[in-house]
Image (cartoon, grey):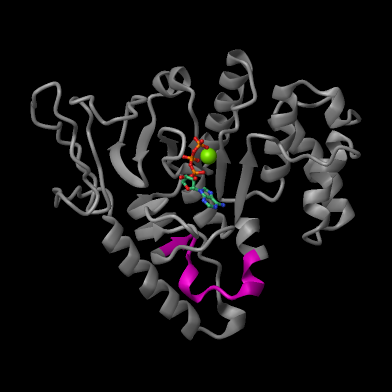
């Protein structure tokens, strides 16, 4: 699970924050689109999760790890739990498809036997069987992105984060990549993906979170639309205070939907915990976990 509580980020020399008190709860196994205009703060939010950047204020917990208590040496461990995919693939150009995926396992100390078992399976999952010996330069854009996804999935992360994975692809390949992410999600991996691809977002009808000027201005739980300025009055919204499936009240078409996070206390949904409750549970789990003898500690990834 992913939890952000009033997270703010100021880059040096910037007077306005790139993220402004962002609160967000993503449950395990959710599929979430993060949308927003250029400069809205999408990549910054993702960098908070991967620890590429640190927040100036607020709290972040991912997969049972409270970032406030994370030691530097735990960062590689965190990156094993979170798979990350980028717009520009970031493949090793002098290594084949097989080697690119195998390398991701080698560097975390997976045995050769395990690598030999895992890589073909992952390549099959992403539809690249038969392309093992090709170099990135010999692949189409879609195939390159599939290789990058295979590489990040090889370690079987619980969370896969993709920052504009379709940014360099044509519409057909874009849809293919998003469908692949959907398939991976069906296996139980949490997916968070940023995109500018309106068609794909509207087709998949997943949860859609909209950022504007570093703030969450829309959080549509199901059947979400691509809606950059929050002006779609039919949108259902959800915030850290708990899921709120109640439709937004009718409003004049011109009036923008007010930001919900931290503003509107929303009715509680029996089925899902609110962010606050989850936070509390996780704190408790962490304390209990630490009280156990090391040998008995179990991993609590979600
Ligand atoms: N490394 C950085 N140093 C300084 N300012 C930055 C840095 N990265 C981002 N910013 C600023 O933070 C704001 C948010 O940028 P961010 O990259 O998160 O936007 P984005 O929503 O991902 O945009 P895009 O859709 O263009 O990728 C922008 O105003 C940007 O100029
Ligand atoms: Mg970006």
In the image, is residue 87 above or below residue 25?
above
Q: Does residue 137 belong to the magenta stretch? A: no
- In-image side of 134 versus 298 (left or right): right
Q: Kindly identify the residue that appears in the image at 81 percent across and 23 percent down.
A: 139
Highlighted magenta segment, given as a residue range: 60-75
Q: Does residue 63 belong to the magenta stretch? A: yes
- Residue 108, located in which quarter of the rendered image? bottom right
In the image, is residue 137 above or below residue 18?
above
- In-image side of 133 versus 287 (left or right): right
- Work out whether residue 207 or residue 90 is closer to the camera in this orientation and state it: 90
Q: Position of residue 302 (x, y in %)?
A: 47, 58
Please give the count of numbered marks on the rendered protein: 0
- Work out whether residue 261 or residue 302 is closer to the camera in this orientation and state it: 261
Quadrant for the N terminus, please.
bottom left
Q: Kindly identify the residue that appears in the image at 18 percent across and 31 percent down.
A: 256
Q: Position of residue 214 (x, y in %)?
A: 37, 47
Q: Position of residue 7 (x, y in %)?
A: 37, 59
Q: Position of residue 30 (x, y in %)?
A: 43, 41
């Amino acid at each position: 699970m992913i939890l952000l509580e009033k997270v703010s980020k100021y880059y040096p020399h910037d007077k306005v924050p790139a993220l402004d008190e962002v609160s967000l709860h993503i449950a395990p196994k959710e599929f979430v689109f993060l949308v927003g205009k250029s400069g809205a703060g999408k990549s910054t939010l993702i960098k908070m999760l991967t620890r590429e950047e640190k927040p100036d204020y607020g709290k972040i917990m991912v997969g049972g790890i409270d970032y406030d208590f994370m030691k530097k040496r735990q960062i590689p461990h965190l990156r094993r739990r979170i798979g990350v995919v980028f717009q520009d693939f970031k493949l090793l150009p002098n290594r084949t498809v097989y080697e690119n995926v195998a390398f991701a396992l080698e560097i975390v100390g997976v045995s050769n036997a395990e690598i030999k078992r895992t890589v073909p399976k992952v390549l099959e999952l992403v539809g690249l069987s038969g392309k093992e010996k090709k170099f990135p330069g010999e692949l189409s854009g879609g195939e390159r992105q599939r290789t990058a996804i295979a590489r990040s999935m090889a370690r079987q992360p619980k969370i896969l984060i993709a920052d504009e994975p379709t940014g360099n692809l044509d519409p057909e390949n874009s849809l293919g990549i998003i469908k692949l992410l959907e398939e991976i999600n069906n296996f139980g991996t949490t997916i968070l993906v940023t995109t500018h691809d309106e068609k794909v977002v509207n087709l998949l009808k997943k949860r859609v979170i909209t950022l504007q000027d570093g703030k969450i201005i829309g959080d549509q739980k199901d059947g979400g639309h691509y809606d950059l300025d929050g002006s779609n009055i039919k949108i259902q919204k959800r915030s850290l205070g708990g899921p709120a499936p109640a439709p937004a009240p009718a409003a004049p078409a011109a009036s923008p939907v007010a930001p919900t996070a931290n503003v509107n206390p929303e009715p509680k949904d029996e089925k899902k915990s609110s962010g606050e409750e989850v936070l509390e549970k996780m704190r408790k789990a962490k304390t209990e976990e630490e009280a156990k003898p090391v040998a008995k500690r179990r991993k609590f990834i979600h």
